Amino acid sequence: MRHLSSKKKLNMKSSYRKAYLRNQVINLINYGHITVSLAGAKEIRRLAEKMVTIAAKGNDFNSRRRALQLLPYSEVALVKLFTEVAPQYVTRPGGYTRILRLGRRASDSANMARLQWV
């Protein structure tokens, strides 16, 4: 049975996985797209969409505090999230990202995907 196991482990310890997901969301905010494995893209999408939902509610103190708690590494990315990314999706009810499948990676045959904003 798979009770209480909704997240993919991505073959990492929990602390590594948390840092990996945070850094990839920061890269997605800064560059607009990232290329990762398909399983990684699906997990990164979960956190990225949460961040946009928090930021789209407004640029008040509580929203910034919650966003900083989830992405503590980069103040530049938070500013960009609140000023450029989130205002585009205020009227959209969800689904802020898209995953484009790119085929398999040559070295280990992992399914690759490109995660980008809609």
Image: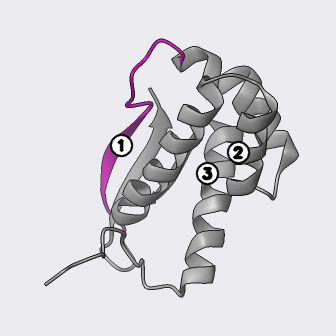
Q: Which residue is mark 1?
A: 99
Q: In this view, which residue lies farthest toward the right?
A: 75
User: Which residue lies at the image location 35% right of the left edge and 80% below the top edge?
Assistant: 108
Under mark 3, the amino acid is Val
In the image, residue 87 sits, relative to residue 44, either above or below, namely above
Marks 2 and 1 sit apart, C-alpha to C-alpha, by 23 Å
Per the rendered image, the range of residues in magenta is 90-105
In the image, residue 97 sits, relative to residue 93, either above or below, namely below
Marks 3 and 2 sit apart, C-alpha to C-alpha, by 12 Å
Under mark 2, the amino acid is Ala
**What colour-coding does the image apply?**
one colour
Tell me if 100 is positioned left or right of 70 in this view: left
Q: Residues within 10 Å of mark 1 (few under 14, many from 20)?
A: some
User: Which residue lies at the image location 52% right of the left edge and 19% below the top edge?
Assistant: 89
Decide which of tag 3 and tag 2 comes sooner along the chain: 3
Please name whichever residue, 115 or 65, is drawn nearer the observer in this view of the structure.
Answer: 65
Residue 96 is inside the magenta segment = yes
**Quadrant in the rendering for residue 72:** bottom right
Q: Which residue is mark 2?
A: 67
Residue 78 x %, y %: 77, 39
Residue 13 x %, y %: 54, 87
Please name whichever residue, 106 or 73, is drawn nearer the observer in this view of the structure.
Answer: 73
User: Which residue lies at the image location 86% right of the left edge and 45% below the top edge?
Assistant: 75
Under mark 1, the amino acid is Ile
- Asked whether the beta carbons under mark 3 and mark 2 sit within 8 Å of each other, the answer is no
Q: Residues within 10 Å of mark 2 (few under 14, many from 20)?
A: some
Residue 71 x %, y %: 72, 54
Tell me if 112 is positioned left or right of 47 in this view: left
In the image, residue 114 sits, relative to residue 112, either above or below, namely above
Residue 110 x %, y %: 32, 71
Q: Which residue is mark 3?
A: 25
Marks 1 and 3 sit apart, C-alpha to C-alpha, by 14 Å
